[in-house]
Every structure is written in C-alpha cells, then in structure tokens.
Amino acid sequence: MIEKMKKFTFLVTDREYEGFIDSIRELGVVHVTQLAQGGTSPQLQEAIQKEADYRRTLDFLKIVGKKYEKKKAQKELGGHIVNAPEIQEPAELLSEVERLQTAENELLHEIDELKAEVKILEPWGEFSLEHLDHFTQATGLNVCFFSCTAKKFGGEWAQACYATPICEEKKKVYFVTFSKECPDIPAEQIFLPRKSYSQAVSELDAAKNKLYDVRAEMVAINNKLRPVLEKGQTEMLNEISLSKVHLSSERTCGDVLRLMMGWVQASSTDALIVYLNESHIYYEVEDPAFEDDVPIKITNGRFSRLFEPILKMYSLPNYNDLDPTTFFAPFFMLFFGLCMGDAGYGLLIFLVGLMLVLKGSEDNKAYGKLAMWLGGSTVVCGLATGTMFGIDLTQQDWAFTQPLKPFFLNDNGVGPIFGYSPMMVISVIIGLVQILLGMTLKGCKAARNYGWPYAVGTFSWVVALLGAIVLYGLPACGIELASWIQYMLLGIIGVSALGIFLYNNPASYKNPALGVLSNIGGGLWETYGMATGLLGDLLSYIRLFALGLTGGVLGGVFNSLALDMTASWHWSIRILAMVIILLLGHGITFALSMISAFVHPMRLTFVEFFKNADFSGGGKQYDPFRKIKD
C-alpha cells in the first residue's frame, strides 16, 4: 500500500531559519523537496568525500578483521599483539588508518624487493662485498658473477678467466670469474646488491615484523575503535543531509524570507502542525496534485513485505500507481517453485533460509524468510509434479508413492490435458489469471485517478474475457451449460462489447460526433492489440513448464549417469564415484535452476504483469530529513 502524503510549503524568516531546521530535523517527518535540482556547495562536496573515506575505511577494516579471525591467518601475524591507539576523534582515527594503509603498501613493496634480493644472494652464500673490493684493489682483478645451464658451462672458461663454480641448483651453475675486464661469455651476468645474504635476510625479517605490527594495529582498531569511525560516518551523513536541506530553500521577498517545500506522511502531520503553530511559522498544507513528484513510502504485511526488494529492482511505484507488491508476491512465489520444479532442491532452499533466520544477522533474516517461502513453494510444486532430486516419482515402485501416482501433474500421472502436458496447460491458466488480475488493477487505477467512466473500457475487456472463458472453456472440459446460461453469457459479452467499442475514451465525447468514431476506432485498435498481445503474453508463461521440466530431466540424467556408468565398478570405488557425479551434477543443475527461477519470474512480473496492470513506476523513496543516530 502506498502511504498518503501531504504537501507542506513553509515561509521562514532568516532569524527563525536555523531553529526551524533543527526542529524539523528533530521531528524527522519532512521529506524536503530540492528546489534547485543539481545544486551543490563546497561543504556538501567535502562531506560527501569524507563520508566516502569513512565508508571505504570501514569496509577495508571489515575485510582485515574477517581475514585475521581465522587461525591460519592469525599465525601470519607471528603472535604480534598491538594495542589500539587511544584516539577518540573520528577524523584523527581516519587519518591513522590511512597512514597504516600507506605503510602497509610501502612495506609490501619493500618486502617484494627484499625477497628478490634474498633470491639473488642465496646461491652465493655468506660473504663480504667489502673483502671482494679489497681483493680487486690488491690484485687488479674484477670479480664477476654469472649463471648458466650445467650443459653450457665450459671448462675453457676456467683457463680464460678462472671461472669457478660456486653452486649448482636445478641444473643451473652459478660461478664467478676473475679477470681484468668482465669476460664476454655466453652466460647471464648477475649484479648482486651491496649487502650480504645475512643482512638481506635480516632486513626481510625486520620488514615482515613491521608489516605484522601494522596489520595487528589494524585488527585492534577494527575490534576496539570501529564505533569511532562509524560515529564519524554518521556525522558526515548528517552533514550531507543538512547541506542538501540548506540548498533546498529559496530566498524570496528581497532575500528576507526563505521558501521551502516538503512532503509529510499524512498520518504523521499532527506533531509537525503543533510545532509550526506554536512557533508561529507560516505554512500551507495541501493534497498532492496529479502532476506532483511525490516521494513514495510503501507499507505491506509480513508476507508481501518480503517481496519489496524484488519490486525495487524494477522501480518504486509513483504516487498515481497502485502498489503491486501484494498482487505479484504470491505469483512470484508460485513461479519460482514451478521453475525450480524439484522438491529436493526446494528443501535445500528452505533449510538455508531457516539457517539465515536462526543464525543470520538482522539484515539477512528477511532474506531467510523469503528463501523459506520460495523453498516451501518449490517443495509443493516439486511434489505436485512428482520430482525430487531428479527422480520421477511416477516411475518408482515405492509403496508410499503408489496411491499418489494418478495425481502427479505430469504425463505419467494425470496424463495429457487437451492433448498437452498438464503443466503446460496449468502454466497458461496461471498466466491468464495473472493477466486478468493485471487488467483489473489497470481499471482500478484508471477509476481512482480519472474517475469510473475511464475504467469502463478496461473492465469491459475483463468481463468479456471471463464470459468467453466460461462460455467456451467449460464445455471444452466436458461441462455442459444450459441454453439460458449460454444466452446470458452471450448477452454479457455483447454488453461488454458496447463498453469496448463505444466507451473506451470518455474524454472524446466532448465532441459527440467525433466521440463515437474515435471510440470505435480505439476499440478496433485495442481488439487488434488484445488478439496479438494476449496470445503472446500467454505463450510467455509456458516457460514455467519448460524450465521446471528441464531441471527435472537434467537431474535425472545425472542420476542415471551415476548409476549406469559405475554399475560394473567395485563397490568401494563406485560409491565414491557416484557421490562425486551426483554432487557435481546436481550442483550444476541447482545453480542453473536457481538462475532461471529468479530471472524468468521477474521477467513475467516486470513485462507481462506490469504491462497489463499499467504500472508506470519511477517513484523515489520517501526519505524524511532527520538526524541519523549512532
């Protein structure tokens, strides 16, 4: 349900302005309208940047905290324990974390360089470069370092330049030469850093210890001082909302007065009106005009509320729409179950949802409840069609399935309906019901926004279609209708045709001569659209049958593969192979079915249902100006 709103216009003097802003912020019921779209200020830009810094830092610390909760990662810190700094100012703590991040990046770069140096020095062992320098000064011979493959190392190098092997690793020889000039030989010359191997290892260990200290301090800040950063983020969010409100006022009467507009939920106006009267603030209250861009607050029951995130993925309704959540929620749940089509998979979804409800955070509990509803729907649909973990229950000789076999909604149970698979026919019937519901909502929307005369054309189509379904559908199912009922239904369809062709556009009757022709032309055009569009819409719902069937068949294929391919294997190997095939196969099937079970019900809802319900969308969330609490 879309909550009713009231439009408030305020006229405030400069002397009253600051107190007025603080008061409506404390009340927290006014959604302030931004009069200058796209307006900004240095204060707003600075607050937005600071809030982004706090958010990014909190996300970073959250990742660090999760990483070092694990025992393996805790060992990486080498037992380093660092107390959190005694900082209670959010801005100062933010700077400290940014400093730690910079230090971590610098240390990681330094460690990479030191690892490269250790790798270069390791084959040569421990020696002093200073001693080599003294040797060069004393003898005039340069000491050069080379490496090459063992096959390539030539004995003639020993005579030409006193090539001396130092070590051999992985078929690679490391050797030194002694000569006046570095010899030109087909080997890779190595330039050593100006430090010993032990010094490089010591510097590497020191850098690692510094890194562990930095990371330990980050963990301590996340564990002890996270609320300080969250407080800073909240302050910035409040500053952003305050800056936007300041930009939403407009000076008038020679810059003496400020004009401000806002929206208040109709049920929350009393406290605001009392404050305005007591403070002698001039205001006007009025109902929204049809063309107003009214913020939206939707309120639904415990069941329908779970499906609001799905609606918001498309759009919030605008103020002149009907809230479709209550109407599409049961259909979406049913569509999901039909697309999954497997009671076993539904049970898994239900259990995951139950775990989220019992063990998850408050934010995830709503998603857990939604998963439980969707999983329960899948269990019911899977049992109705006789499929569980890819097993066709109608093909099994289990005792408990024997009395149920004739009632399973598949070709081996109920059997074909009108020559078609029963689930195909049921899918089309479900689609017809949802489309007729959408058309009914379209008529209700037209009646509410423009008056009942503008809903006559839509309701006439609904009545005509229902009459035709009863007149021709029941006899097709073997139910004979009495003659007087048939004539009555024909009469109802005939009266509906008058509404379709003569009253689909009441506004055109302002000119009576043209009005009749305009309505007849409009009726013919709608008839063409209904004949082509309705058929296309109904055929779209066959995907419910096709996707459910595909998931069941694919699961059955993996079951057969696990049983048949391993039939001749030893039982010990066969069990392991079957488990691997079943887990992998059903994992793939489950993942594909989950994707289909979300995408296609959303497609049927957003395209077929919303189109027939004349759902416009485009609403913006009702966000009253208030102080965010820590």
Image (spheres, rainbow, N blue to C red):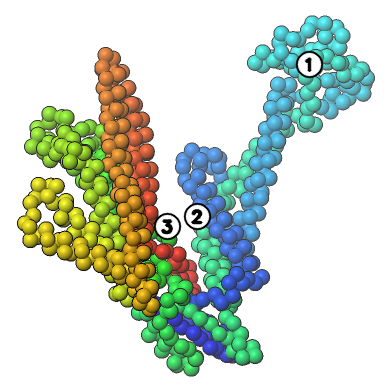
The numbered disc on residue 314 is: 3
Mark 1 = which residue?
187
Residue type marked 2: Asn
Q: Secondary structure at mark 1?
A: loop
Which residue is depicted at the point 61% across and 55% down?
Answer: 97
Residue type marked 1: Ala
Q: Residues within 10 Å of mark 1 (few under 14, many from 20)?
A: some
Mark 2 = which residue?
223
- Tell me where residue 408 appears, x and y as whole percent: 16, 39
- One can see residue 356 in this view: no
Q: Secondary structure at mark 2?
A: helix
Is residue 226 rendered to the left or right of residue 507? right
Between the residue at mark 3 and the residue at mark 2, the CA separation in whole angstroms equals 38 Å
Q: Residues within 10 Å of mark 3 (few under 14, many from 20)?
A: few
Comparing labels 1 and 3, the label whose residue is closer to the camera: 3
- Reply above or below: 535 against 569: below
